[in-house]
Image: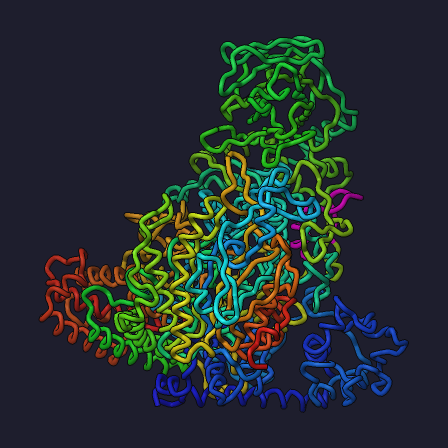
Amino acid sequence: MNPLEAYQQNTRREFLTTTASGIGALALGSMLSDDGVLRAEDAVDAPASVQSNRQRPHFEPQAKACISIYMAGAPSQLDLFTPKPKLRELHGQSVPNSILEKARFAFIKPDTATLMGSPRPFRKHGDCGMEFSDWLPHLGSVADDLLMVRSLYSEEFNHHPGQLMMQCGVSRFGMPTMGAWINYGLGSESTNLPGYVVLTAGRGSSGGATLYQSGFLPSSYGGVLFRNQGEPVLNLSNPQGLPPELQRAGLDTLKAANNRRYQEVHDPEIASRIASYELANRMQTAAPELTDISQESQHTQEMYGVGRAEPKKVWRGSLGHLQTYDTFARNCLLARRLVERGVRFVNIIHASWDQHSELDFHLSHNAECVDQPIAALIRDLKQRGMLDSTMVTWASEFGRTPLGENRSGRSANTGRDHHPSAYTMLLAGGGLKGGLTYGSTDEIGWYPEDNPVHINDLHATMLHQFGLDHLKLTYRFQGRDFRLTDVGGNVISDWIARA
Amino acid sequence: MKQRPTAVLCAVLLSFAVTTSSADDSAAQSTLRFASDIQPLFAKHCLQCHGPDKAEGGLRLDEATGALGELDSGQRAIVPGNAAASQLLQRVSSSDPDLQMPPDGDRLSAADTAKLKQWIEEGAEWQQHWAYRPLSRDTVPTVTDNSAVRNPIDSYVVAELDRQQIAPSATADRYTLIRRLHYDLTGLPPTPAEVEAFVQDQSADAWEKLVDRLLASPHFGERWGRHWLDKARYADSDGYEKDNNRPDAWRYRDWVIQSINDDMPFDQFTIEQLAGDMLPGSTPLQKLATAFHRQTLTNTEGGVDREQFRVAAVMDRTETLGTVWMGLSVGCARCHNHKYDQISQREYYQLYAYFNNGDESNSTVPAMTAFDEAGRAERASLLRQLRQRQSHLHQTLEEWLPALKAEHAAASDQPVAFHLPDKMKISGPEGVTFTRQSDGSWLVGGANPERATYTIEVTGDVDKITGLRLEVLPDESLNAQGPGRTKHGNFVLNEVRFFAARQPKWDAGDQQSIVSATASFSQDGWPIRNAFDGNEDAEKNGTGWAVSPQFGKVHTATFGFDRPVESQRNQLQIQLSQQYGSQHTIGRFRVSLVTGRLPGTGLPDEIRQIVAADRISVSQQEALVRWYQQRDPETRRLQQQLQTMQGDTMSVRVISQAGTNRTTNILRRGEFKQPLEEVRADTLAILPPVSARQQDAASDRLDLARWLVSGRNPLPPRVAVNQIWKNLFGTGIVPTMNDFGVRGDAPSHPQLLDHLAVRFIENGWSRKSLIRYIVTSATYRQSSRHRPELAQTDPLNRLLHRQNRFRVEAEIVRDITLAASGLLSSKIGGPSVFPPIPAGVTDLTYNSSFKWNTSGGEDRYRRGMYTYFKRTAPHPNLITFDCPDSNVTSVDRDRSNTPISALVTLNNETFVEAAQAMAQHILTHADHTDDTSRLNYALQRCIVRPPTEADLADFQQLLDRSRAWYSEHADAAGKLVGNRTVAGSSAEENAAWIATLRMMLNLDEFITRE
């Protein structure tokens, strides 16, 4: 058998390969162990530098894939998810000092700040009676499949650190993101596509590439950006004027030459290299097939809102040229197609939710952009029997203040400031309960009242659904066993449909 | 084929079991070694609860006292010589769930328990963790067969191999050797001519000559500079959110390249980067070196708490120091005592305190541009003259020292006094009036221009003026009562200048150096030191002193000179330059002359101590001469020349000591708003103590830097040589580059590590000398061919039975490709460049605000290390090949091998262009006109060695196949060729070559350093 065949025979799950310290044998070892042939950890007491930290599920997983829809900038929970009649009543009044003394603001001047009720009408949806404002009618229509958490909180007050907190469980740089952790824990099931794919719509986020980094995990666990313009994956297309048949011929020459070198020097890394080129070649076919959504029925495309025009009323500077409505709808549909093909983690990033002013205009614009495609995704996954094994999340780094933002130089309060103390997120599928509204905040929405949920708790529960014990999914770096939940995290059993 | 990887692997894995069990056998017979047999068991199973942090039940297994002493229960965990009485052994072997240890997690194996038992029975000898022990100076081991020994390195390696009855690998062939050395020392492939010369060189020192040539290459500094930049977390942007541009960042990068090319000793390299600003008489370049600390991230988000991110940057500096110089994860002690290593939370904040008073500031430095060969020669000549002058000053010390002693004696310790001059003449811009007030101050009125310089001439009768005091005063007539003339009362004082001359005709030569300043209050970001940093140009973000929001109050600033001014014979002139614009000028002020000793003026404390001493040690003399150079006219002239050839000046981000001392507190769980008790700057108790320059004072950042490289602290030299070793072997003698603590791997060759560390220090911390020593060893020159027969005994090559074989780094993948194609620019240094980047990458930055203007001309083909590094959108070609993200320090890169990286070298614009250019080069080469000759030449440009028949046949086949296809697809051929046409070759022929050469550039052998 040649090295490639040997390699292929022994790796089904691992699309991206890596080596620790350039030592191929161990990398191959971790791949073999994936298939249960042999686990490096069982066989050897390997030194720390090359210890194969790969994990298997710690118990039977309920979720296999995750679609994380990330709304960077901090959408206002008060205008979308949590009706606060009392806040409306107190509109225009100042806040008790007891609250202000402890609070921190980016732009609000506490001396003259006043409460701002939401003018939005709220309505109960579904059998469960989950409440949404009138800006989210489609999400309301799948309410019975959603879990709404109204008592989420974070410690980070600024966007980029907050985004790192949500993605990495700790707001420091250099840490792995959730998608990297889950791929590290479970590997990918796709042979032709990466295990962690990132899709974006509209403008860039504060965190940029740090929101899908692998941190100290091997870089092959990092997110691979699929693009909205040009080729779906960077460098996917052959050079202009080079046909697939010559690509193949070239790869055959390359394989033969690399093979000869392998015979000469016996370095198993060469086998990995040959395999990487072969997989790259397969991806050249698989990725365009994936992104070709013309294969989907007219009905499906319409359900997601593919081809929707951007609303005519476009605010200056709102980047209407990026065609966010259409792109976001496509991304939701692509996410389903990615999961169907065995991709473990899809991160859909959409950034423009930082409404310090003109909140009504911008938030309604954004809500309309994402409402229909996300509802369609939930419905579509359910129709296809994929929702039970696919977790969908809708979240941001923090929420927005019950106070109006009275930035100096402005005549009226038209926006809200950053508010990490209490905000709202949605989850669906992956073995979580549908139709559940979890946790509550006080009557003006300042602090959680019942069942506060820290981001570490959220991550612990998510990992649990993937069959991973957040205390055991660790990686040794600089002598410490790091985990996604840092030093916190409790699994919230109330969220889990089947115990 | 001989061996399937699967089989290799199974053999590898099984071999571990074999090795382990054989180790157990020997363990039963011989005395155990604490460091390798016992301590790792504690680290793995016990320290989390019985370590520096928790010490549950009164038991600490990280140090002898806590391990051997009495427990809370009154019992003892370890009774030396008596295993039966040792609670530790009872607990780890108990099957009672209430008693057994560890209570959960992995239990100790029977073999491990047996080891513990034996160790206790044998007396429980406790040893300090290897990394903290002093460097050992063992004698070089003798080996039975000296044939494989070229220098002592080989003796250490062969001795270990002997023990396992393994012969070292043969020396690699010359083709492999020259390519290896080129990749390692310069990161560039040798040219075919260089290969030929080396292969033909029959002289005994052919290798040494090659080594010396490459060590002297200006590209050496690029290659090894990039290694250092990983540690420095160097990038061209701020990091957080808006991730703003840092247009001056490259200047520090160039300092690193130059310093390494100059073989700046590693101790100096360390001191200048950590505390160059605090060296007596520090030069602009020494200040520039502290830009190391400015590679931390900056957050300019709206509404950030500046203190929060200042604290975060100080923590990063603290933790970077720990990782880069000591291999310790001090960051683990930020929130609590370290779980495993002997680093307490208090000690974390002691280290933090060294950096807590280092403030972010700007400094003006020469904007060195890349030098051509003539420039390099001139610079080398100036540097040589400077060195000669320095040794001259050493030799003539006796001649100039008495004057210093006299100055010291005369200057000592008069109390500070302030004198209001009687005779003053003041002038300013046209229309501005100055009215003398009864308190001696001036009230400014009349015209209110955008900018102003006030010039005050003084005829003094005060002797020995040591400084100048400026009081800015409130006044009812000013907006917001002043002291400034803006609407809101602020001002910006950009520069204070003080001149003393015999005649009232002052020029630059008469200017007195201001060396220190204090202010009663400074606006955040506008500290008083800005008023004498030489930077007043509003166009270039001139810096200054300002006082918002403390309006309507008196503020005092006192400036100290480097030496006293004899005013009785002099005419004095004071200039207050206020160039900020929008009427940021002073409305009422008073100037006084200062006598007596101001803190921080006159001779620096360190120099005073030396001058006052009866005897001067060698190291003191070193420091004295280094400081005295700034007073030596000849040295100043040479430095001036050097500066002139280094072009214009530019402002760079650096660190300097804060004017006011912050106290440092332990922060509860690292929260900046939750201070606990106060701590003083100090180092780790586990290491030799730091000594402060000033007796009775706390040590400072400069003392810390000197402590690291004093030679007494064993960690920095061990860590430094391990890093150098890793760059020459792919992995360190200590494989866990970032962890020399108890959870890291022990060194494979501890005596060799110490031998290298000792030698490094003894050779004046010269990196070039150490690298030369290593690469001239036989160990380095071994073949990297894997030896399947050793897959069982030494699967990871920890014993160095061969060289290692590994893929080159991200930047080098680009460099060697461009070099093979002939496109690579050899230009060194200068602002970062923007090679082609796929469309859309930079759209994903904050607000899609970043525009990548692709560089043209030579800058399109610069080495990978010059690619502009935007932290939130790094170039994908770099990241795909594991270039670190630069957000935190990196001492060890991944070497991933993924389909995504295959796609880069196959299809990326830069790599396709390289194939096109290579085709142009091959098809127009006069010496190579037929297929075989061309293929042969092209392959040698990539893989250096002569290709085999099979190699040539395969690529000939690909060439033929491509020709056949393109002969029928002329359009496609034109597309592949693009604008890189070749006169005399058809597009079809050209395209066939491009398709063929492209695959050569993808060979595993090409991007692998063998």
User: Considering the image in quadrants, where does the N terminus of chain A appear?
Assistant: bottom left
Compared to B95, does B668 lie above or below?
A: above
Say whether residue B476 is left or right of residue A18: right
**Residue in the image at 23% along x and 71% along y:** B936
In the rendered image, residue B770, in percent from the top left (x then y), is placed at 54, 61
Give B347 or B953, whichever is nearer the viewer.
B347
Give B389 or B964, whichever is nearer the viewer.
B964
Indicate the quadrant where residue B559 lies: top right
Say whether residue B255 is left or right of residue A193: right
Q: Is residue A309 magenta?
A: no
**Residue in the image at 72% along x and 27% along y:** B407
The answer to whether one can see residue B840 in this image is: yes
Q: Which residues are magenta?
A: B690-711
**Residue in the image at 50% along x and 54% along y:** A79
Q: Main secondary structure of the magenta part?
A: loop
Indicate the quadrant where residue B95 lies: bottom right
In the rendered image, residue B402, in percent from the top left (x then y), is placed at 71, 30
The answer to whether one can see residue B292 in this image is: no
Give B136 or A65, whichever is nearer the viewer.
A65
Give A225 or B356, whichever is nearer the viewer.
A225
Colour theme: rainbow
Q: How many marks?
A: 0
Say whether residue B809 is left or right of residue A229: right
In the rendered image, residue B500, in percent from the top left (x then y), is placed at 61, 18
In the rendered image, residue A154, in percent from the top left (x then y), is placed at 60, 58
